[in-house]
Amino acid sequence: MPDILQLLNQIVWGAPALILILGVGLWLSMRTNFVQIRLFPRALRSFFAQLRPGKTSDGTVPPFRALCTALAATVGTGNIAGVAGAISIGGPGAIFWMWLCALLGMGIKFAEATLAVRYRVRNQAGEYVGGPMYMIQQGLGSRWTWLGGLYSFFGVVAAFGVGNATQINAVLSAGHEAMSALHIPVWKGMDLVFSACLAVLIAILLLGGAARIGKAAELLVPFASLGYVLLGAVVLVLCRERLPWAFRAIIQGAFTPQAITGGVIGSAFQTLRIGVSRGVFTHEAGMGTASIAHAASDVSHPVQQGMMGIVEVFLDTIVICTMTALVILCSGVAVPYGATAGAELTTTAFASVLGNWVPIFLALALCCFALATVLGWGLYGVRCAEYLFGIKAKGFFVALQAAVVVLAAVLETKTVWILADTVNGLMLIPNLIALAALSPELVALTRSYDKKKGKRSRV
């Protein structure tokens, strides 16, 4: 099965997919006059302003809570295990392509969040719902409903793999590392018991809907992210003499990976493919998933939430993923080039500089990240299931999510990661097609926002 999935993954993430991602990202950036750069300062000011609590109307959530829900799904094991895997399989140069993917991804995520608010609708429970499936149906017309249905099908499948099994699997791995550091033996059946407890907690939160998930994300994401970034900053200060070499390895490795990896990774295209695919896995720009969370935001203009999409990718990839990559490269630990590495490589890198207590903190941070990711993706899966089968599908979907949390305790890691990576690629196709087709509406919304703010639009 892993060999079959690996072959399918290479097809899905082949040259056509890379051209589609980079091409649509560049097209949207050019059409909006590189809005991710032009509105970036205002987006950051808006982000910090949203830290203050505010009132919302019925069926909506505060913009910051919507951002936290989106970040809950993006900031996860991809930032810790995914980056380690990108470096080991694609070499340090994969991080360069991850940066480029993030720059274009900021423009894509802006488009996703903006159009999600523009085409959102109210469901039978009175909540605002949106995302690629509604964007396709409302924006492209009823004859394209099948494309929205295809996206929703992929979304339901991904919610069990990308947003569930891979996260729980990584949590259990980190837990074993922490117990090993504390010299605590792993007893038989421990993983199943822990997973069962998590399954109950996750089911309770998912049944509470977007409001309850948003409140949990608002607590988990800032705490875990800030702690992780501060810990990484300490490592980089202690290893600051290796920072120039790390940046040089990233830049040089993007074009001549064999010069850095000793010939183990000799294909620049492989480095590009891994960097882009792992970049999409962590910030999810192009997949359209985060727009499902952004659609519920209480804003007066769609572009206001679009700017939160810009901040989302920046925090996830440019800040947190870069921190992970630099810690691995600056720590001096041996990277198993050509093999698949995960959270254990990141943990070893931190521990080699700060000591054996670090795995305990990283296990806690990873648990927070993973729990938040399961909740965020749980919301995405619920919305996709509701689109396909109606609002009554929610209870059945939540029950299946809880079951997969328990099942993840016995799943084989490599198979789960390959499956998650493959489904990510499949979700890109309908979403990017719709974004490209609806770019005139995006341009009109951007112009109206520029005019509203008293700035001349050059779009």
Image: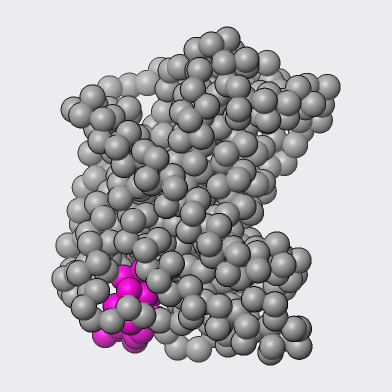
At x 70% / y 81%, what residue is drawn?
Answer: 457
Q: Is residue 190 above or below residue 458?
A: above
Query: As rendered, which of 78 and 339 lies closer to the eye?
Result: 339
Q: Is residue 125 above or below residue 376?
A: below
Side of 181 where 39 appears, left or right? right
* Image quadrant containing the N terminus: top left
Query: As rendered, which of 102 and 228 lies closer to the eye?
Result: 102
Query: As rendered, which of 175 and 349 lies closer to the eye?
Result: 349
Q: How is the image coloured?
A: one colour
Query: As rendered, which of 216 and 129 lies closer to the eye?
Result: 129
At x 68% / y 30%, what residue is drawn?
Answer: 251
Answer yes or no: is residue 67 visible. no
User: What range of the chain is rendered magenta?
Assistant: 120-138
Side of 365 where 162 appears, left or right? left
Rendering coords of residue 214 (x, y %): 48, 67
Q: How many marks?
A: 0
Rendering coords of residue 181 (x, y %): 54, 19
Asked whether 135 falls inside the magenta stretch, the response is yes
At x 25% / y 41%, what residue is drawn?
Answer: 406
Side of 308 where 78 appears, left or right? left
Rendering coords of residue 219 (x, y %): 56, 59
* Image quadrant containing the C terminus: bottom right
Q: Quadrant of residue 381?
A: bottom left
Q: Is residue 199 above or below residue 178?
A: below
Answer yes or no: is residue 306 visible. yes
Rendering coords of residue 383 (x, y %): 30, 68
At x 60% / y 22%, what residue is drawn?
Answer: 256
Asked whether 251 falls inside the magenta stretch, the response is no
